[in-house]
Structures are given as C-alpha cells and as structure tokens.
Image (cartoon, rainbow, N blue to C red):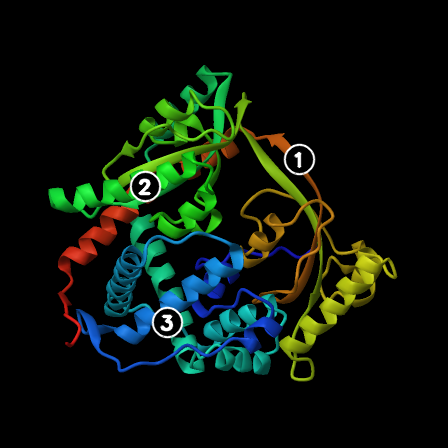
Amino acid sequence: MMSLPRFSRALLTPLLISVLIGLGSPLSQAQTRRPVPRTADYILAVVNQELVTANELELRLVQVREEARRTGNRLPPDDELRKQLLDALIDERVQITYARETGIRVDDAELERAVGNVAAQNQLTATQLRDRLRAEGIDYTRFRNNVRDQIMMERSREREVQARIKITDGEIDDYLAKQRGDAANTQFNIAQVLVVVPEGASDAVVAEREAVAQAALARIQAGGSFEAEAKALSGDANKDKGGEIGLRPAARLPEIFVNVVRNLTPGQVSPTLLRSGAGFHILKVIERRDAGDLTVTQTRARHILIRPTQQVTQQAASRRLLEFKRQIESGAKSFESLAREHSEDGSGPQGGDLGWVAPGAFVPEFEEAMNGLKINGISEPVVSRFGVHLIQVVGRREVQVDVKQQREQARAALREQKYEEVHTDWLRELRARAYIEMREPPQ
C-alpha cells in the first residue's frame, strides 16, 4: 500500500477557489452570464506598496452576489457588504506583502498543481478553465496571481501562527486529567456568526457592529437561515461552512461559548449576543454527544491512481477517472476491479484498499476529499503531487487511542484551541505595522 505523506503546506481548497473566481454553477450557466462590467478604475486603498482598486472590489462583489444567488444565501445591505469586502481585501494585501518580505515563494510547479486541481474539481480541462474564466470576465493571468497569493498567505499563516503557539507538557497533562475526570464530558458541534470588531474601535464602531449582529440574530430568530447569515457576515475561518466548527469537547471551546451552549439542545440558537475580544457572536448547537475515553475516527478508503506522463496529461487522466466513476455508478464495473486493472499505485492489486487510517495520514487535498464523502461515496478526480485519484470511502469507525496517541491528540486539540486567538492577534499586529491609506472616490 502506498503511504501518502502529508504536505507541510496546504493547497487551496476547491471551495476557496470557486469563491475566488466565481466557479460555482454549471459551465452551461456560466457561459450564458455576462462578463463582469468594467468601469473607470480608481484607488480605494494603498496598503504598503500594494493597491486596492474599485474594479477589484466590484469584481469581488459580483462574485459574492453570484454565489449568494446560486445558493440562496442572504447578503447584508450593500454598504455593509462593501465594507466587509474592502476590509478583507486590505487584510489580504497586508498578508501578501508580509509573505513576500519574509521570502515566501510559490514555484511554477506548485502553482500549476493548484490550478490543475481547480480544473479537475470542476471537471474541466486546462483549456476549458481558461475559457470559463474568460466567460466570467476574469483575466487568466490575474487568476493565476490570485491563486499564488492565496497559497502564499496560507503558507505565511501556517509558519507564523503555528510558531507562536506553545504547548507545554503541563498543559497536556491538565487537558488529559480534565478529560478523564469527566467521564461524561459533552462534545459539541456548534456553528457561529462572528461580527468582528476591530481592535481599538471607537464606541460608534462598536455600536454599529453590535447593531449588525443584533439584526442578524433577529432574522435568525424569525426563521431565517443561520448558515446564510454566517456566510454573509461572519469573520471567522469557517464562514464558508455556514460557521460550523466541527465536533469538539467542551474543553476545546472558549468558556463563554460553553456557558451558553451547555443549556441548548441541537438546533437551538443562543438567545442573546455574546461579546468577546474578537467581536459579537451568535451560536447554534448542531450536535452534542457524551464522550468518555479519547477516541479517534478512522476511515477506510480505496482509490485509483493515474500518474500523468508526457503521453497522458492531467486532464486526460481526470477524464479517464470520470469514465471509471460513471461505470461504477451504473453498475457496469466495480471499484475494486477497475483499481486492479488500472491503478498505478501499489494498492491496486488489493482493489485500491488503503486500509484503516487515522486523520493526518494523507496529503491535505486527498484527505479533504475523502472526509467529504459519505460511506460508499465516490469523489470527483482529485489532483495531488502523486497524480490524479478517484477515491471511495468504504467505512468509518471510532477507536480508542493509546497513551502516546492521546498526548498527540491533546496537543493538537490545544493548538487548535489557541489558533484562532493567535491568528487574530498576528493579523492585528500586521495591520498595525502596515502603511494603510484610505482614498476617497473621485467626485
């Protein structure tokens, strides 16, 4: 069986790319839409030596509106949406300039893998991707530069934020003792809407952000979609998942969250806003369960791997795997037989079986696709540095972990618990050191 080692750097997720370039609807729909309108451009902000322009903001606005139209999500008022998107663009410029200043680079091979992954996940060839972008009114060179910038920002965040997170053996001991001392420790899967309040904000700005959050809470309480509000308003990293953070023990949640959600049942929303150093929060309980000993979810998967060559392009490999998927879903062939016949991985003779694996066993793009599948579900073609994969999940199970694994799991949980706070502090420091000049639109 081939072992897929983890990348030290995360690649762009298809969802992030789809938001970035507007790839969310079927190609046939995209071809009927008008290109993004262009107006006389002007500068909205200067960030260090980078510019944020009006056309750039308008392009981002069109993409967000299109995504909202496709998914049925509700957007905030236009002025509020523009403020949020402009602030996000400034944050991106701050991070990009810092990444460049600290020597972070993305070589052409890595960029091509990321772009190829976008094409494959959207079932497109490289040529079709170019055509699709042109139909959307998006310059291909700008798209590639955006992909490069996103990878640089992710790499910078991983390096700088992770380096600031320190976990001591004592903290691990305390974490494990707390877990063992509460045999009925409750785990929560919650979602949040976070309306961010900038550090050092004036009373007027705080009041305005509170009003935005209060209006969102009122819409939710009146029957509106929590997920839509999170996607439209939230300033946290999980906004594109409707604010859902995943199942976590109470010990890995902020205490102010636990004090509220412990009194809620699945489906219920916090009755009032929560105020933290980051801003105003609205919480929803998605799931809660009792947990005793520490466990880990193992997944059993199989895959078919085709390695691109000079004769077989990445796009040709993707098309071939899509045909395999069609044959499997129609019942004409089994996954195992196709893996034995065609997979170029060492697991091929075993029908592509990769065995039972714990989280972190595979490279991020493979694991992300695998984790998104239901039992017996089959992925779209997934591009990694090993080639192009077709993945099927055949089982999941919860298993107890040994002492060493418990400590590793505790360390990971503590790092995750600290990550958001450290990342927020780091970004605030970058903004405080950056030269940011806001420009008024021409009259």
For marks 3 and 2, give the CA distance. 27 Å
- Which x, y percent locates residue 250? 42, 26
- How crowded pointer 1 is (Cα within 10 Å; few <14, some 14-19, many 20+) is rated as few
| Residue at which label 1 appears | 397
Say which of 365 and 253 sits in front. Answer: 253
What residue sits 14% from the left and 56% below the top? Answer: 432
- How crowded pointer 2 is (Cα within 10 Å; few <14, some 14-19, many 20+) is rated as few
- Which x, y percent locates residue 13? 49, 60
Local SS, label 3: helix
Residue 197: numbered disc: none
For marks 1 and 2, give the CA distance. 41 Å
- Say which label, 1 or 2, has the lower sequence index: 2
| Residue at which label 3 appears | 59
What residue sits 62% from the left and 74% below the top? Answer: 28
> Which quadrant is home to the C terminus?
bottom left
Place residue 82 in its image quadrant: bottom left
Instruction: Work out whether residue 11 can be spotted.
Output: no
Give the residue at the far front of this rendering.
222
- Check disc 1 and give the amino acid type: Arg
Indicate whether 409 appears above or below 315: above
| Residue at which label 2 appears | 215
Q: How many marks?
A: 3
Indicate whether 292 appears above or below 386: above
- Check disc 2 and give the amino acid type: Ala
Indicate whether 417 appears above or below 76: above
Instruction: Work out whether residue 190 can be spotted.
Output: yes
